Amino acid sequence: MTDALASALNPAIDDARLLCRGASRLLYDLGYNAIPEFSLASNRRADLFAISKKGEIAIVEVKSGIADFRADNKWPEYRDYCDRLYFAVSNRFPHDLIPDEAGLIIADGFGAAVVRESPHEPLAAARRKAVTLRFARCAAERLMRIDLSQG
């Protein structure tokens, strides 16, 4: 299915893309480099996975609406792969639904702001090394695919 067809069939896809873009811009401003749709070793996929200059790892779970939030019970598993966990939602989303175990980011297509900081729960060194290596390989593979598709 093409992106255009997917968007036409489900407008929430466009909402999620805009939230993701705004949250990515915020992460960059905070000193993180992020990649979307990052697959974890658990076979779960984080909407945004980011690493800071200091090696701190953050995962941002993007929720385009209440139904999307209520249907997703996998987010607690992300805690095993990051130092900080956030939800990125629009300003219309009821903020009180976001659990205290996660930070809250309010986003739109242009930017975002951290409304509530995530609790900091440092990863074990071995897990940090494994996740960082997986991130580096994923980012490099994506760059290689872009290069190969243009040549």
Image: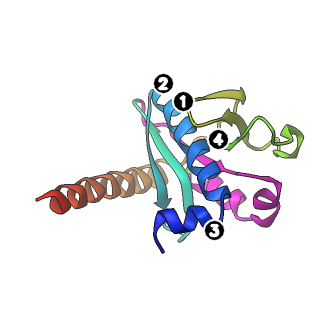
Residue ID for mark 2:
29
Q: CA distance from mark 3 to mark 2?
A: 33 Å
Q: Residue furthest left?
A: 151
Residues under numbered marks 2 and 1 in contact, where contact means CB atoms less than 8 Å apart: yes
Query: Three-letter amino acid code at disc 2?
Result: Asp
- The residue labelled by disc 3 is 9
Residue 129 x %, y %: 40, 51
Mark toward the viewer: 4 or 2 = 2
Q: Under tag 3, what secondary structure?
A: helix
Circles 1 and 4 in contact, beta carbons < 8 Å: no
Label 4 to label 2, Cα distance in Å?
A: 22 Å
Left or right side of 137 for 11: right
Give the mark, 3 or 2, whose residue is nearer the N terminus: 3
Image vertical order of residue 77 relative to residue 19, above or below: below
Looking at marks 4 and 2 on the same chain, the residue that comes earlier in the sequence is marked by 2
Q: Is residue 49 left or right of residue 76?
A: left
Q: Amino acid at mark 1?
A: Leu
Q: Nearer the viewer, residue 36 or 90?
A: 90
**Which residue is found at the position 25% from the left and 53% from the top?**
143
The residue that label 4 is drawn on is 121
Residue interval drawn in magenta: 54-81
Label 1, secondary structure: give it.
Answer: helix
Q: Which residue is mark 1?
A: 26
- Amino acid type of disc 4? Glu
Secondary structure beneath dot 4 equals loop
Residue 37 belongs to magenta span? no
Residue 99 on image: x %, y %: 82, 46
For the residues labelled 3 and 2, say whether their Cβ atoms are less than 8 Å apart: no
Around disc 3, counting alpha carbons within 10 Å, would you say few (fewer than 14), some (14 to 19), or many (20 or more)?
few
Task: Please name whichever residue, 51 or 121, is drawn nearer the observer in this view of the structure.
Answer: 51
